Amino acid sequence: MELRLYLQTALEAAFLAQGIHQYYQAKGFSQSSKSTPTDLVTQADQEAEAAIRELITSRFPDHVVLGEEQGQDREGSFRWIVDPLDGTVNYAHGFPFYAVSIGLEAQGEVVLGVVLDTARGDLFTATKGGGAYLNGRPIRVSGRRELLGSLLATGFSYDVHEDPENVTYFQRALAKGLVVRRPGAAALDLAYVAAGRLDGFWEVKLNPWDVAAGWRILLEAGGQVTGLEGEAYRLGQRYLVASNGLIHRALLDTLHGR
């Protein structure tokens, strides 16, 4: 498998998206709502995904692209999983925590991940068996062993008023005195756990494009990603719990109210 070639393509696609994000931040942009008034889409989302798709399909016409804005129209052994702008609400408000996320799935396994923080310029990359990197330097998860004192993050779905399950988990964490942030971009949350900036992260109802790239980056950095019961995580499942591995069981216990 030509992982080096695929990684180069992912990097070029990510920097294309960054340029589009920056252009519309400077020029101004139109926006509209999707599922709820807070579920936004902007010109930057749409044009970034179109540019990423065009680059990938021009080089690998037999590969499939799954993107947040345009979905997926066929099946294939190689699938690029793309969030052209993770953290759209942050982007729309000028809050500098958003990213482009690009993962590559080969025969059902995510083997490559690129997450580019387009506001700060932080570039997180990983390939299967090749380690995880931030701006070209190797990264590892934190060595924190105690849940109390760890820095955690979570997120909430756009329809939290209809599906408030994660509010329960959030309350359980706060009741234990845990420190929890809600930055608003899952791809970066996972990358931050990989880099040791966060010790753990959980969320409910994430989509494959929110997770794929950050998942591979975190695994390569020595972290752990499971479902709510500690089972192996798979793309598209309802629950995701990620950590440095050392606090994982304690985090699961907390979410269960134990």
Image: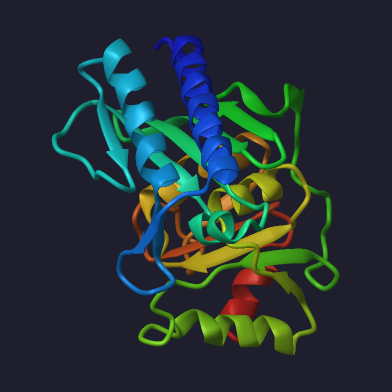
138 over 149 or under it: above or below: above
Location of residue 111 in the rendering, given as x and y in whole percent from the top left corner = 45, 28
Question: Please, which colouring scheme is shown?
Answer: rainbow
Kindly identify the residue that appears in the image at 36 percent across and 86 percent down. 162
Is residue 105 rendered to the left or right of residue 27?
A: left
Please provide percent x and percent y for residue 2. 42, 10
Q: Is residue 1 visible?
A: yes
- For this orientation, the residue located farthest to the left is 74
Whether residue 258 can be seen here? no
Front residue of 56/244: it is 56
Question: Looking at the image, how many numbered discs can be counted on the residues?
Answer: 0
Towards the viewer: 234 or 117: 117
Q: Quadrant of the image for the C terminus?
A: bottom right
Query: What residue sits 60% from the left and 41% below the top?
Result: 26
Most extreme residue toward the front is 27
Q: Toward which corner of the image does residue 222 lie, by quadrant? A: top right
Quadrant occupied by the N terminus: top left
Q: Position of residue 29 (x, y in %)?
A: 46, 49
In this image, 21 relative to 171: left or right? left
Compared with residue 171, is residue 230 higher up or lower down, i.e. above or below? Answer: above
Please give the name of the residue rendered at 34% of the width and 55% of the height, measured from the top-left corner: 236
Residue nearest the viewer, comparing 123 with 231 = 123
Relative to 105, does residue 46 appear above or below in the rendering?
A: below
Q: Is residue 80 above or below residue 210?
A: above
Q: Is residue 53 left or right of residue 6?
A: left
Quarter of the image holding residue 172?
bottom right
- At 64% from the left and 79% from the top, the residue drawn is 254
In the image shown, does 178 or 14 lie closer to the viewer?
A: 14
Q: Where does residue 212 sit, x and y in percent of width and height?
A: 45, 42
